Amino acid sequence: MRLDRILLSAGLAMLMAGCVTTTTTDAGGVSTKIPRTSKAEKKEEGARVHTALAQQYLANGDLQDALVKLNKALQFDPNYVPAHTVMAVVYERINDNANAELHYRKAQSLAPTKGDTNNNLGAFLCKEGKAAEAIPYFQKAVADPFYQTPALAWTNAGACLVGTRDYAGAEADFRKAIDIAPQSGEALYQLANVLYLQNDAFRARAFIQRFDALGQPTAASLKLGHDIESRLGNREAALNYSRRLQSQFPDSEQARALDATARQ
């Protein structure tokens, strides 16, 4: 499951909407209007800056200081959605899933029609084994006409359905993701996997080959390629995937699984 990234600027550029101005006159008699930040704008800017700093700490692995900055951000503006989202991510990193859920839900409640807040909550709920509750949030995410990454939500929805063994429903969602973003590696891999799970190795091969053509193999994709070719009886192609897996990801769980199978 993937979350939408929250990108913030640490700059102090003021929001101009609703801005109060004062007028000054220079020695030549020229009047200049100078924006004066309102109280509400100052609160939002404080929340924005502290959330951006928290993201820097998070990127550097300093989760404790990230939490300090996020708490400061929410003191400025308790309803600042990005702060709640980043707070949820930090809590998830420290395995405090109760607080992570609280902040994902808060972000979604503050922006109930936004694609990113709905996708993030859905992804979290699915990881928590709450697929039935998660799916409607993915549907809300893709219903947002301004959502920039609907393919991500469709892919997450499909992965969630795979967990419930609704393979047909998952296949439909992955295809929707690929229709939107044909080069989405995650969607291509997931569709290949769900077709393989439905014993359709021939069509699965086409999508794992499309994934492989992107040039970013993973241990999981190479293992799946091996399994697909093995099921199709193509020993040479299966061996090629196996060699690549052992060479590129020798310490992976997938490589160990193939080793164990070979020794049997």
Image: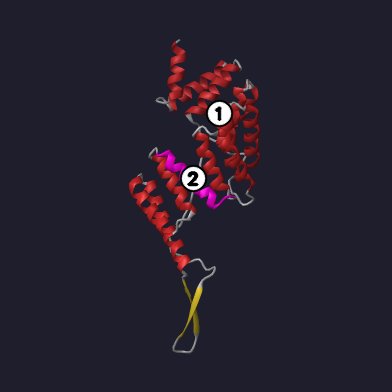
In the picture of the structure, the residue carrying the numbered disc 1 is 163
Q: Quadrant of the C terminus?
A: top left
Lower sequence index among marks 2 and 1: 2
In the rendered structure, does residue 108 fall within the stretch colored magenta?
yes
Q: Position of residue 186 (x, y in %)?
A: 55, 35
Question: Which image quadrant for residue 208?
Answer: top right
Q: Is residue 195 left or right of residue 215?
A: right
In the rendered structure, does residue 41 fall within the stretch colored magenta?
no
Please say if 64 is above or below 47: above
Q: For the magenta stretch, what is the residue range?
A: 96-112
In the picture of the structure, the residue carrying the numbered disc 2 is 104
Q: What's the residue type where badge 2 is placed?
A: Tyr
Question: Foreground residue, 264 or 57?
Answer: 57
Q: Secondary structure at mark 2?
A: helix
Q: Report whether residue 57 is seen.
A: yes
Q: Position of residue 48 (x, y in %)?
A: 44, 58
Total labels: the figure holds 2
Q: Residue at x 49, y 45 (%)?
A: 104
Q: Please, what is the dominant secondary structure of the magenta stretch?
A: helix
Q: Position of residue 251 (x, y in %)?
A: 39, 25
Q: What's the residue type where badge 1 is placed?
A: Gly
Tell me the CA gap for discs 2 and 1. Answer: 21 Å
